[in-house]
Image (cartoon, rainbow, N blue to C red):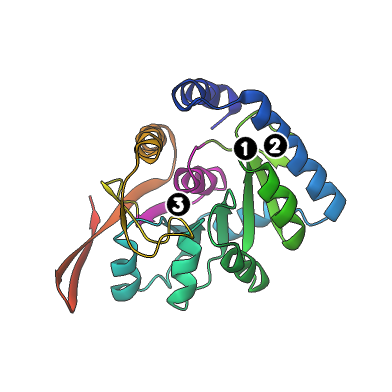
Amino acid sequence: MKFEEWKPFYNEIVTTMGYDVMKDREAAKILQELLLKNKNYIKPYYLREIIEGNKVYIFGAGPSLELALKYLSFKDGIKISADGATSALLEFGLVPDIVVTDLDGRFEDIKRADLLGAYIVVHAHGDNIEKLKEYVPQLEKVLGTCQTEPLDIVHNFGGFTDGDRAVFLAEEFGAEEIILVGFDFGDVIGKWSKPHLKEHAPIWESKRKKFEFAQKLLQWLKKNGKAKIRRIVCHPIDYAISKCYIER
């Protein structure tokens, strides 16, 4: 997604969510400065080498994620986790190849994934400036992104939430097939979505609005992108069995 294509979506998001464009731009600049100071940024071609021509699994933190990780294997593709889903993957013994995060998830797990070899795609916005300052210097391999105009080493590939940004990232770097895991978009938020959650929780209004934008953006990408995008759906049958299938 070129910035010109992203801008109308961004303007609608800012209007609906009440975000501050100037704070978003400030966050992008701060991320740029942090990456230059710490020399821990990577070039985009590192991700292209991993993603291009491959099947990519993208893990969101929806309630069905636990079932998918329990009953399915993801050894035949590249694994990208969206923020809090990183904790779930590590819990089930999987190390993501790439983590896409605005640093809202459990940072200890994001840092652990970084140390275990994952590339960390850190997103800057007006509400996470302090987290950028605290956490970015602790990471080793960072690709910076933002939701305003890109700034040389801080990129904008499109997308809004961690989950759909990960999908746009995979499309940008040439994924052949993208399979969504734990993308439920329902009335229940997965327990890995926020560090303070101990169990799945009812959705709150701002999250519902974010889900609506994420679904809108994914529909745009399905029509305009090159990669085939499908979703794994999981339903529990009883305490020991789950039915998981790829949505056609």
Rendered position, 233 above or below 173: below
Q: In this view, does 111 lie to the left or right of 152?
A: left
Horizontal and vertical percent for residue 1? Answer: 53, 32
Say whether residue 179 is magenta. yes
Q: Which mark is residue 27?
A: 2
Label 2 to label 3, Cα distance in Å? 32 Å
Say whether residue 190 is magenta. no
Label 3 to label 1, Cα distance in Å? 29 Å
Label 3 CA crowd tier, 10 Å (few <14, some 14–19, many 20+): some
Q: Which mark is residue 125?
A: 1
Residue 43 vs residue 212, the one in the foreground: 212
Could you tell me if the residues under marks 2 and 1 are in contact, i.e. CB atoms within 8 Å?
Answer: yes
Label located before the other in sequence (2 or 1): 2
Q: In which quarter of the image is residue 7?
A: top right
Could you tell me which residue is drawn at 40 percent across and 70 percent down? Answer: 74
Label 3 element class: loop
Rendered position, 128 above or below 86: above
> Start and end of the magenta stretch?
159-182
Label 1 element class: loop
Could you tell me which residue is drawn at 67 percent across and 72 percent down? Answer: 115
Horizontal and vertical percent for residue 232? Answer: 29, 57
Residue 38 in view in this figure: yes
Could you tell me which residue is drawn at 37 percent across and 39 percent down? Answer: 211
Q: Which amino acid does label 2 sit on?
A: Ala
Q: In front of the other: label 2 or label 3?
A: 2
Q: What residue type is labelled 3?
A: Glu
Residue 79 in view in this figure: no
Q: What residue type is labelled 1?
A: His
Residue 18 vs residue 58, the one in the foreground: 18
Label 2 element class: helix
- Residue bearing the label numbered 3: 176
Label 2 to label 1, Cα distance in Å? 5 Å
